[in-house]
Every structure is written in structure tokens, then in C-alpha cells.
Amino acid sequence: MTVPSINIGDESRFFSYPNARAPDRRRTVSSSGVNLAVYEWGDLTATPLILIHGAFDFARTYDVFAPLLADAGYRVVSWDHRGHGDSEHAALYSWVADERDMLAVVDSTTREPCLAVGHSKGGSMLAHAIQALPHRFTRFVSIDGLPFRSPHSDAAKRERKRVFRDEINDWLDHRRTASTLTRKPGTLEDLAKRRARMNPRLSHEWLCYLVTLGARKDDDGWRWKIDPSMRMGGIGPFRSRWMTDRLPGFPIPMLAIFGTIEETMGWGVKPGDLAPYLPPSTHIEVMQDTGHFIHIERPDQTARLILDFFKT
Amino acid sequence: MIQYLLHNRIWLALHRLKQEPGRPLLLLHGLGECSPSELPPEYADWPGPVYALDFTGHGLSTVPQGGGYTCELLMADADAALAALGEATIVGRGLGAYIALLLAGARPAVVRGVILRDGSGLAGGGASGRSPYIPVIDTQQLAPPDPYAIADLATDARPPSYSTSYALLAEQESGLVRPVMVCAREHPEWLTAVINALGVETVAVPEALDEYRRLPYIAAE
């Protein structure tokens, strides 16, 4: 089948990106039957460092950032969450399932306590897992990875009720059709432009590079690999305060890095919101003029902060 | 007769226990249980067909790999049954009672009353206040029921405010005088909150069935 709009020659320039480096190793871990794609940068015998991506991302979004940590002497291990990137699409998804997958990857890497860095949802997963299993981790870095929401005002109650009802209905309607859904095909640059809605501060060239890794090329065009049954904005009983209320007793040293510019994919957290909940020993760093994807916007500066924190 | 419904990648077994014209009665089982193989005598007088659904990982429904159970997922299981049956009255045992409540709030136009009964998994993991915990699964256990379901759905959080949000949606949008009937003796925190929010009292199952059987039935086209 010929698709005139796709020209391999034109696309080849997107298969590399300045300072991006493919992982040194790729392996598969079965988390109770769900196959997870695991990637490693750095020497196999170096100190393990677990690096966790956020929602709707995948491990290769660390192609620039992870090598900076690996070259400083760490074995950086990341994986595509179930349903993301090259990991298997599962029948079920949940926070706890993602945490069990994380433990399967950590167990496959080391049984010793290890360093852990998480971005966005990856940071929140780690914060919870470290509170559950503090003996498995030595230091924690959150890259805009801690949730916080201010209490709603009474005036907003009626609106909240309407939103709640609509969200449940939308989600159930989505579940009724989930088995028939496929990701929309397009040219490589189409997909990059679509992703720009989630990553408005990242360059078109970077997003095109991500397409070459996070999407596959079918006869009718490129498609993101992420499971089409997944969608933004799930429903459930989770309350951010369950996490924030426990932060004062956080069991291991923490570096919390924040940006200053709010983005759709972020938590909308300001350092001042969370500061009262963080243990006094927490290292708080704020990157000025930076959005939610701090490590992609400022990879060198972020890596330096983390490496310095590991040395303290 | 068993009809299989596709919910994303899961085939759900919907058992028809009685065939008769009228509004369906849908039975939802408790945690680790499965649908009854025969019509329980207490539902024999229901003026319509009686169905029972096996949740994901239970009974004759698919047991998926790697867990990831949530009550919201099971609500969508039950919603798949509603999509097949049209309007229905729901009786839930234990875990199934909690799922029935969620669905009553989520689909108030088609859920014509829910009856919440005692049974396994009624309380879940409590309101929220326990220590962070990641359940470790004994994968050597025979399935069904899926050991991941047992672990995940016995430890999930069920905050009272979340449950009452669904209960109030059912009350405000179903048009029913009593959209939720509590027939359970066990009152976990979420159910106490629902009872208080709706101002209802515990009733006997026959009374609850009697009230809902009198509701006019509009068959789906």
C-alpha cells in the first residue's frame, strides 16, 4: 500500500537528536505475566539508579537526560510502564499495578537499597512506594513529582458535582467503546504536533524524535504505541492529601525539583504549597522559567543538581 | 444461559437465571465469589428476568495477567451489563454492594434502585488512613478468583466523601424516592456515611425488593 504523504527520506532527519543516546542495554521483565521493556544506560556494575517516567511518557524520553547520569558513574535503569512505549498492553491498569511493576524492575536490577528518581507520576509512585518500603531505597529525587491540591471553596461545590458526574459518565462511555479504539494515524510530524498539546514548551524537533521511538509506522501512517484504551483523567477515590500528610515523616533524603510555569501535564504545584509538608532536611530546588518537563528543558542543570544531591 | 460481554480485553460472563418479561434484576457477587448457578429462591418472585454478572477475574469471566483491579473497573464491568440489559434494579453483595452504589450514582437514569447486602469485600481497605502498602500476591493460588483481585480489592480505599458523592447523585438524578436500600448489618465507614447522607434506615431484603418491583418499567427499544 502506498501512502504518498509519508516520505522516508524526509523523516530520516528525525531519527537522531543532539546529545540523545540510545540505551546501552534493553531487556524484558515479566511482571506477573505483563512484559515490560526495560532500558539501561551506563556500566552494568555501577551503582543502580531507578528512573521513572510520568503518565503518557515512556523511558526513551530520557535519551538525553539518562546518559548524563550514567556518564557520572551510575547504572541508570528505566522501563516503559505497562501500556506505554514498548511494554505490553495490559487488560487492567492501576496505581498499585504500576507500583508492583516497578518492584519487579527494581528486583530484576538489585536486591540492595537503591537510588530513585521520578518525574511527574513517576515521582508520586516513588513517594508512595518509598513510604511503603523505605528499606528498598536510599535517596529520592522528585522532578515535579509530588501532587498537591488546595481545598476547594464551598462556592465551587455545585460546579464540582457537575464535573464529577460528567467525568464518571465520560469515563464509563469510554470503557464501553475501549475494545474498538485505535490510535489515530498520521505523518511523523502530525504526531509531533499532536503531542505538542501535552508538551507545548518542547521543540518540534524533539517531539519528532520522540515519535520515532514512541510510535510505530503502520501502512496507513504513524501511530503512538500507547494503549488506545488508556486516556487522560481517570476517576477514583485518590486524595492528594493522603500523600502530603505523610511527607513530614518521609523516611529517606529527598531532593524536590520544581519548575515555575504551569502546564497541562503537571500537578500545578508551587513549592510554597508543599514546603510546609516537606521534612526540614529536604533539598528544594526551583528552576526559573521552566515548565513541567524540567529534565528535558534543562537536562544538564537537572543532572548536576541530582548528582550533587547524591554526593551529600 | 450465559452471555459473554466484551469489556475492553475482558470477556464477562452474564448469567441469565430466570427469563420473564419485565425490568431485569441484576445480581452482583462479593469479593472472591461468583454468580449463583441457580436462581436464589428469594428472587423467584421478581417480576422480570434475573441476571448475575461475574466480575473480571471471577467465575467464568476472563482472569487477566498482572492484576490492576479497582472498584471503578468493576463499575465499568457492571455498566457493560447495563448496556446489554437496559434499565435494571441491582442487588449487590459485599464488594458488589459497593459497586452497585457507584453505578447507581453514575447511571441514575437506568439504575432503578440498588439493594446493598452483606457479603465479602464490603469494607474494602477502609477509608484511607492506613499505612502505605503494596500488596504482594501469591501467584501460586488457583484462579478464579484471581488472587490479584482478592489482594487489590480488599485493600483499596473507600473514602466516605467519595461514596456519598455517588449516593447523592443517585438521589438527585434518579427521580426515585429511595434509590438506595441498605440491607446490610455490617456498616463500614463508607456505608455509614451513605446512610447519614441519604437519611435512610436499614430495611429487610423483601421490603426493598417489594418497593422496586412496583416501579414502572420502560423497556429499551
Image (cartoon, grey):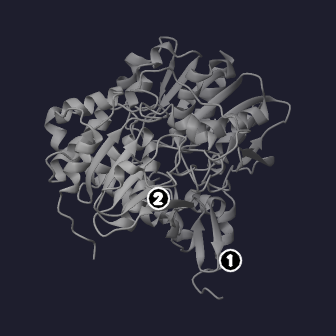
Q: Quadrant of residue A54?
A: top right
Q: Earlier in the sequence, mark 1 or mark 2?
A: 1
Left or right, B143 with reference to A291: right
Where does label 2 land, which residue? A196
Name the residue furthest right.
A45
Q: In this picture, is A138 found above or below B178? A: above
Any part of residue A172 in sight? yes
Q: Report whether A25 appears left or right of B36.
A: right
* Viewer-closest of B194 and A300: B194
Which residue is more in the foreground, B113 or B7? B113
Q: Which mark is residue A8?
A: 1
Q: Nearer the viewer, residue A209 or B33?
A: B33
Q: Amino acid at mark 2?
A: Ala
> Residue A122 placed where, x, y %?
56, 38
Count of all numbered marks drawn on residues in the image: 2
Q: Is residue A95 above or below residue A184?
A: above
**Residue at x-position 65% and y-position 41%:** A65
Q: Which quadrant of the rendered structure holds the C terminus of chain B?
A: bottom left
